[in-house]
Image (cartoon, grey):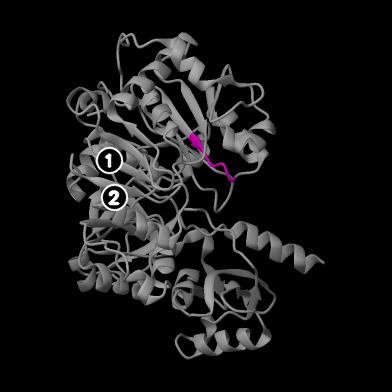
Amino acid sequence: MYPGTWARTSPDKPALVMAGSGRTLTYAELDDRSLRLANRLRAAGLRPGDVVALLSDNTPETYEVYWAALRSGLYITAVNHNLSPDEASYIVRDCDARALVVSAAKADLVARLDVDVEERLAYGGPVEGYGDYEAALAGAGDDPLPAQPHGDDLLYSSGTTGRPKGIKLPLPDYAVDEPGYKYVAIFGGLYGFDESTVYLSPAPVYHAAPLRFGGVVHALGGTLVMMEKFDAEGFLAAVQEHRVTHTQMVPTMFVRLLKLPDDVRGSYDVSSLRCVVHAAAPCPVEVKHRMIEWLGPIVNEYYASTEANGGTMINSEQWLAHPGSVGVPLIGRPRVCGEDGAELAAGQVGTLYFEREEFEGAPFEYHKDPERTASTQHPHHPNWTTVGDLGYLDDDGFLYLTDRKAFMIISGGVNIYPQEIEDLFSLHPAVTDIGVFGVPDEEMGERVVAFVQPAVPGTPELAAELTAYARERMAHFKVPREIHFRAELPRTPTGKMVKGRLKDEYAAGARR
């Protein structure tokens, strides 16, 4: 259940292939190189429970570091390389990293980090202040480790509603070559991952789902095809070239695929696809309908969080019967509660909690932040936890999300969910991207504002056209009172809008 297993049975099989360059890492190479790095980290004094941080673009070495940590009982913290130096430094310091491995492609960011780490290594070229990764592996040797306790990830939230939070889960109590690792156990069977799997990963490996699903592929002996960076036509080319069977995307990627010209989209052979998974952000109903029409009933969705406090799943057939739903329980039991903590009836919107019967308290903790951890717990049930999402259950027990609690707008005493407005515009030909939020209003409490990345010049006439489009299709109190055009909106590569930056920009403009 780790690369060493497959290195013995299929040493020359590609464990990882880069979609752009074609650079390949076999199972024998992945096992050997991750073992050598594990030996290097052990020689540097790292022991089970310690943390190795990784700051890298998408490269094969990312999984050498990942498996070195997991086969040594270490935590791995993958750092978003799009952060500012202060933000990235905060994560490396906060996770208590004793080792930091970086890619030379991110040398400009690395040079500006303010961190104190004992072991520093760089690959892909020299980086001042960092040891040579290849030399370190060559000198570490390939002696078997005295033990291989299973490590885990210690990842940070995307920070869309505040400073990123480290999510620390207890280390597994078994060895890396023993079955039981939660992501393999849950998703391997759910989506049919096995040795024949060719999995295309189009997202940055520093995010939870891409990192973890790549690990599932390796644990089960498949081949991971990793894109250096997502682009819609390049994605289709990779599916065709590598005969991809499985992939995972986010809704913004769906939208970009659907906005390709029909003749371009139809020129690629995607018949090898058996399972298309999407998660990380809500998917507009019309977008998902069109994806199922195009690819067939192979589109699967799960809803979960980096905190892994609970989750749901839904396949195409279930979704067509319950459009807009994110499904039925996969991990834990969803509970929808009002402000007083009382459970709400079907159809009523409230805060979404997940009940985990196997835990007496929260199934996770925010690293070094017990108050924030406590704030996720239900006032009467410590093993019910929330990450701040709002939603409701229908009469059949299917879950629907409305928005993040932090994003909800209250205007004139009425709740408005930005997601609904954003979904309405998702396939409008003049809209490439949109972010909606509330701003203070003396009369209404809050008013609705939209920032739009237009596909055509952003003019007053276009703003009027979009306003009329919305007024024809939704209640007028939900229609944005202001529309601001921007060349690009701040969105994480997994599709989450960073609304805090838009709000800050709006507030700064208002002050001026």
User: Residue 79 in magenta?
Assistant: yes
**Side of 139 where 316 appears, left or right:** left
Q: Which residue carries the number 2 mark? A: 242
The image quadrant that residue 459 belongs to is bottom right
Q: Foreground: 466 or 437? A: 466
Q: In this view, does 332 lie above or below 75?
A: below
Q: Which amino acid does label 1 sit on?
A: Thr
* Residue density around tag 2, few if under 14, some if 14–19, many if 20 or more, within 10 Å: some
**Side of 393 where 209 appears, left or right:** right
Q: Can residue 195 be seen in this view?
A: yes
Q: Is residue 195 above or below residue 507?
A: above
Q: Position of residue 335 (x, y in %)?
A: 30, 56
Q: Looking at the image, is mark 1 or mark 2 earlier in the sequence?
A: 1
Quadrant of the snapshot with the C terminus: bottom right
- Name the residue rendered at 18%, 67% in the picture: 317
Q: Position of residue 380 (x, y in %)?
A: 36, 47
Q: Which residue carries the number 1 mark? A: 223
Q: Give the range drawn in magenta.
A: 78-82
Label 2, secondary structure: give it. helix
- Name the residue rendered at 21%, 36% in the picture: 220
Label 1, secondary structure: give it. strand
- Name the residue rendered at 64%, 68% in the picture: 487
Q: Position of residue 423 (x, y in %)?
A: 44, 73
Q: Do the residues labelled 1 and 2 touch (CB within 8 Å)?
A: yes
Residue 95: image tag: none
Q: Which amino acid does label 2 sit on?
A: His
Q: Assign the magenta stretch its main secondary structure.
A: loop
